[in-house]
Amino acid sequence: MLSVKLTPEESVALHDQVAAELRRAIADGEARRGERLPPARDLAAVLNVNSNTVLRALRILRDEGLLEFRRGRGITVSGTPEVGAVVTRARELIDFARGHGYRRDELARLIESLP
């Protein structure tokens, strides 16, 4: 089972905390490409959160290309530690830019303008 640490008192939503911890596990190689994750209800029970919270986090990671959902086969890690690390850094950059007044589309244009 993955080591995921949540802080319910924190201002960050629980589903975002779950997604961040799973991202970290992928980036650190704790969850390897091709590995199946436990079912959402099992993760939810271990984390003591609602299974919808875990499902929302898993969908976020699927949309980022880090997880793959396969009917009858469960959820597998499809990203590599490198992809996980890049996604983590990209999220940090987005948060940093937001803190300085940039919108996502402005940040994207800025990045595209770089050589």
Image: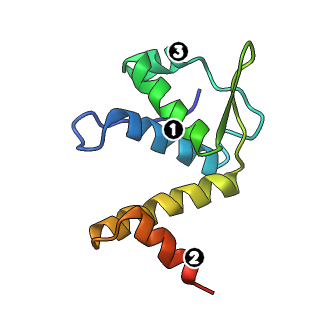
**Residue 81 horizontal/vertical position (percent):** 68, 52
Q: Nearer the viewer, residue 55 or 109?
A: 109
Q: Of all residues shown, which one is farthest toward the bottom? A: 115
Query: Hey, what amino acid is under mark 2?
Result: Glu
Q: Nearer the viewer, mark 2 or mark 3?
A: 2
Q: Nearer the viewer, mark 3 or mark 1?
A: 1
**Residue 98 horizontal/vertical position (percent):** 32, 65
In the image, which disc is placed on residue 17?
none
**Which picture quadrant has residue 22?**
top right
Quadrant, the C terminus: bottom right
Dot 1: element: helix
**Residue 60 horizontal/vertical position (percent):** 51, 38
Dot 2: element: helix
Residue position marked by numbered label 1 in the rendering: 60
Quadrant, the N terminus: top right
In the image, which disc is placed on residue 112?
2
Residue, x 47% and y 35% (percent of image)?
4
Query: Hey, what amino acid is under mark 3?
Result: Asp
**Position above or below: 27 against 70:** below
**Position above or below: 62 against 80:** above
Query: Hey, what amino acid is under mark 1?
Result: Ile
**Which comes sooner in the sequence, label 2 or label 1?**
1
Q: CA distance from mark 2 to mark 1?
A: 24 Å
**Which comes sooner in the sequence, label 3 or label 1?**
3
Residue, x 47% and y 33% (percent of image)?
57
Residue position marked by numbered label 3 in the rendering: 42
Tell me whether the residue at label 3 lies in contact with that at label 1, contact meaning CB atoms closer than 8 angstroms: no
Q: CA distance from mark 2 to mark 3?
A: 41 Å
- Judged left or right of residue 96, residue 10 is left
Q: CA distance from mark 3 to mark 1?
A: 18 Å
**Which comes sooner in the sequence, label 2 or label 3?**
3
